[in-house]
Image (spheres, coloured by chain):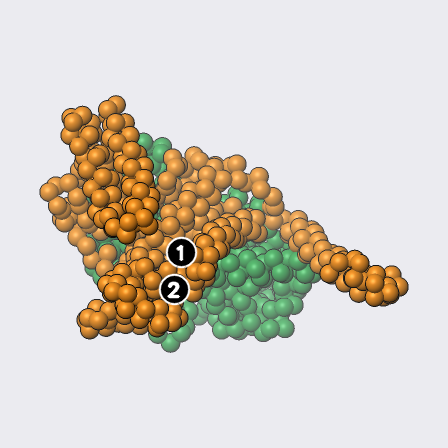
């Protein structure tokens, strides 16, 4: 709608110009809203002042005074509340990323399994979806935590594999890899393998386009990615050391520990969300016209290839927007951490910190901002993915 | 959980709208005192099969209801976790918080709240399973410790282990039940909380005899009722309802002899019970405010023995909570 259009139609007066009016009303609304929020905020601040409630963000730099079960950055009771905030944020991110990863794999496997010719596989997909989609998530979190993991033996009677890997009620313990100077060679070998695998993929595609010959890229890349670093490791005399977890006093020390709270929450989140993703995948596959797979079949493609090359890529158009909202739900659902004491942002910040400082409004506001940012990022990424899959389709 | 977000939403809303009505008028209009208690802690605030609340903390709620409304049953109990309690009070969801809450400087000065007194002098301790063979807290190096979120216990624990150069992992739960379950399942070696609560939690264990409360007391935990700051009338009522219970015990007035003491008692008994003087009037209450408390709820000593003392499963000795003239810290300012 250009200016000239309006002018040609013999302009209405300035006041009657619909565009000016629209702008005017928008402005009015904006001022109204602005005033609304301004008065809420100033009123709240004045009332808090009157009631002797401390306000402001200065608490972020004061010492928290409490410890946290699991932290991805160094943290102890002398750290500040800002560090508490970061610890919580990272823990939320960790459980969300792992959860999304597992849920996606599980969801795609189960979604595709629905179309399997094998009765057992098909039915197990249905049973999985119907069971886990219909049980409240909180219950599932409790199930994994209290009914499954809490029944594991005590530290002294741990289940163990070769005195190196241990499982008990306090968590899952395994050896930690400690680098030596020569380790760098192995990492370089791995990087080279990655680059080589990518080149291989490009080369194989070109060759197939030209000659129609196929190359087993997947197996070749796997061989590269595992083989090359392995060979270098052996040649350089295994430049690693393993730090084994050992039982000292009450608990295992050393190695890597995965706390049961993280395991329970990740399991619950990914299995629950996986069921929804499976449904999305099923819907997406069903949305691809039958003619597509029939055509592929008449070209002589194998069933597996039809799924992976013809059907699923087209189904992605339907699946991706649904994935977007499932991922966002998963992030929000991760706040159920507080029910079992996994130290996510909600637990350590809205829970403990809020209670110790009493800065309810500031803390809840910051927390909302973080979840908002997380979900906006997911949305952004998924919208990019969406653009790509809709392009491929045409 | 999500409840705390909702509470905070409520807090924002009511702070934004403002206008702080007098709690006493609200309570009279409603005909009910809304009282925040724990989600279930034997001896302090606990609900029985019939939905009746009882306990030392519950008795403070009942005393206030008796003083204000003349009926100790006119209380609406709101079970709150440690994390929810202050927001619930700030937002006006409850009129009074009586939930084993420690009086600390931060809470008193920065939350917009006032502590109306102390109804139990406590200190933090440790409970361990007898199996692990520990007899003092100094042997707890490397232990996993179960603890409730948003408590003073969380902070004292960190201080104590740091001071004694011991390491530990803190396993933090939301409610007392979850904390107990964590201890029972073996997720942690130690449970820490105020000692009174350890005794209360211990009798809830499947096998109380397996658990041992260690001798160390690592902090001071004066527990008492809390009200919003800025409503002095309500603050006075809460403070003096508690004082009346303590003073009644000091003056040897209890629920069985209160009628006689009102008619024939000493001058200070009569002043307390309203047959002399105008103590009630000064609080904006009826003359028989304290009579109602003693008659319906009992004096502090009766409440103590019934809920946590020798007449209860907890069997806690009076200790610090005896009257000052019996070697304890319970001391009421004179009513005159
Ligand atoms: N007195 C301490 C601790 C109070 C506290 O919450 N203790 C736990 C003991 S594990 C409790 O009473 N929980 C009961 C509930 O959550 O309802 C404080 O004020 O911070």
Q: Nearer the viewer, residue A285 or B310?
A: A285
Query: Which of pointers 1 and 2 indicates the residue nearer the eye?
Result: 2
Q: Residue furthest bottom?
A: B50
Q: Residue at x 63, y 65 (%)?
A: B24
Which chain does the residue under circle 1 lie in?
A
Q: Residue at x 30, y 63 (%)?
A: A307
**Chain A visual colour:** orange
Q: Nearer the viewer, residue B21 or B312?
A: B21
Element class at badge 2: helix
Q: How far across and down, in percent of the image, does residue B265 sit?
A: 53, 65
How many numbered dots are placed on residues in this image? 2
Q: Quadrant of the N terminus of chain B?
A: bottom left
Q: Which residue is mark 1?
A: A334
Q: How far across and down, in percent of the image, does residue A377 sit?
A: 49, 50
Count residues near mark 2 (Cα–Cα under 10 Å), then give few for <14, some for 14-19, many for 20+.
Answer: many
Q: How far across and down, in percent of the image, does residue A287 sit?
A: 39, 70
């Amino acid at each position: 709608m250009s200016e000239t259009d309006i002018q040609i139609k013999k302009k209405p007066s300035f006041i009657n110009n619909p565009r000016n009016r629209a702008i005017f009303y928008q402005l009015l609304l904006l001022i109204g809203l602005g005033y609304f929020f301004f008065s809420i905020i100033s009123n709240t601040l004045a009332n808090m002042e009157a009631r002797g409630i401390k306000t402001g963000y200065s608490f972020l730099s004061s010492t928290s005074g409490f410890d946290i079960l699991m932290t991805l950055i160094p943290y102890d009771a002398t750290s500040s509340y800002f560090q508490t905030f970061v610890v919580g944020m990272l823990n939320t991110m960790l459980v969300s990323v792992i959860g999304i990863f597992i849920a996606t794999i599980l969801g795609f496997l189960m979604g595709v399994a629905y179309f399997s010719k094998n009765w057992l596989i098909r039915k197990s997909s249905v049973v999985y979806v119907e069971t886990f989609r219909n049980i409240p998530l909180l219950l599932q979190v409790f199930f994994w935590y209290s009914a499954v993991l809490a029944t594991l033996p005590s530290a002294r009677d741990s289940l163990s594999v070769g005195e190196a890997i241990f499982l008990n009620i306090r968590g899952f313990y395994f050896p930690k890899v400690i680098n030596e100077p020569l380790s760098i060679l192995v990492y370089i070998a791995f990087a080279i393998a990655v680059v080589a695998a990518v080149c291989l993929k490009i080369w194989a595609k070109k060759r197939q386009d030209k000659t129609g010959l196929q190359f087993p890229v997947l197996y070749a890349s796997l061989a590269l990615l595992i083989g090359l670093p392995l060979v270098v490791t052996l040649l350089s005399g295994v430049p690693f050391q393993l730090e084994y977890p050992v039982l000292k006093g009450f608990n295992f020390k050393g190695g890597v520990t995965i706390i049961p709270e993280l395991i329970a929450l990740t399991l619950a989140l990914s299995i629950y969300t996986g069921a929804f993703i499976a449904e999305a995948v099923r819907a997406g596959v069903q949305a691809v016209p039958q003619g597509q797979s029939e055509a592929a079949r008449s070209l002589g493609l194998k069933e597996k290839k039809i799924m992976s090359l013809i059907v699923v890529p087209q189904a992605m158009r339907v699946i991706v927007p649904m994935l977007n909202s499932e991922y966002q739900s998963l992030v929000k659902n991760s706040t159920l951490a507080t029910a079992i004491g996994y130290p996510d942002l909600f637990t350590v910040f809205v829970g403990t910190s809020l209670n110790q400082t009493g800065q309810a409004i500031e803390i809840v506001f910051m927390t909302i901002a973080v979840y908002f940012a997380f979900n906006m990022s997911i949305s952004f990424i998924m919208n990019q993915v969406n653009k790509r899959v809709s392009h491929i389709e045409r | 959980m999500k409840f705390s977000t909702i509470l905070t939403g409520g807090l924002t809303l009511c702070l934004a709208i403002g206008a702080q009505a007098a709690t006493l008028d609200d309570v009279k209009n409603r005909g009910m005192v809304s009282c925040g208690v724990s989600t279930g802690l034997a001896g302090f605030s606990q609900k029985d099969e019939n939905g009746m609340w009882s306990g030392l903390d519950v008795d403070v709620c009942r005393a206030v209801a008796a003083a204000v409304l003349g009926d100790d049953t006119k209380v609406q109990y709101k079970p709150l976790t440690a994390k929810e309690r202050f927001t619930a009070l700030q937002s006006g969801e409850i009129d009074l918080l009586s939930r084993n809450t420690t009086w600390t400087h931060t809470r008193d000065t920065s939350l917009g709240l006032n502590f109306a007194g102390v109804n139990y002098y406590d200190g933090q301790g440790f409970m361990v399973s007898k199996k692990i063979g520990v007899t003092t807290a100094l042997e707890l190096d490397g232990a996993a410790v179960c603890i409730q979120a948003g408590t003073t216990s969380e902070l004292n624990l960190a201080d104590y282990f740091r001071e004694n150069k011991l390491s530990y992992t803190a396993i933090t739960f939301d409610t007392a039940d979850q904390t107990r379950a964590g201890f029972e399942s073996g997720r942690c070696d130690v449970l820490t909380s105020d000692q009174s609560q350890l005794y209360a939690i211990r009798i809830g264990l499947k096998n109380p005899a397996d658990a041992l409360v260690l001798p160390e007391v690592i902090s001071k935990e004066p527990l008492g009722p809390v009200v919003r700051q800025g409503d002095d009338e309500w603050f006075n009522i809460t403070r003096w309802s508690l004082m009346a219970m303590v003073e009644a015990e000091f003056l040897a007035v209890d629920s069985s002899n209160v009628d006689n003491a009102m008619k024939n008692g000493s001058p200070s008994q009569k002043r307390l019970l309203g047959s002399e003087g105008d103590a009630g009037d000064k609080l904006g209450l009826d003359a028989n405010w304290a009579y109602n408390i003693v008659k319906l709820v009992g004096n502090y000593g009766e409440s103590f023995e019934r809920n946590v003392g020798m007449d209860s499963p907890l069997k806690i000795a009076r200790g610090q909570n005896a009257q000052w003239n019996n070697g304890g810290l319970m001391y009421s300012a004179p009513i005159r």
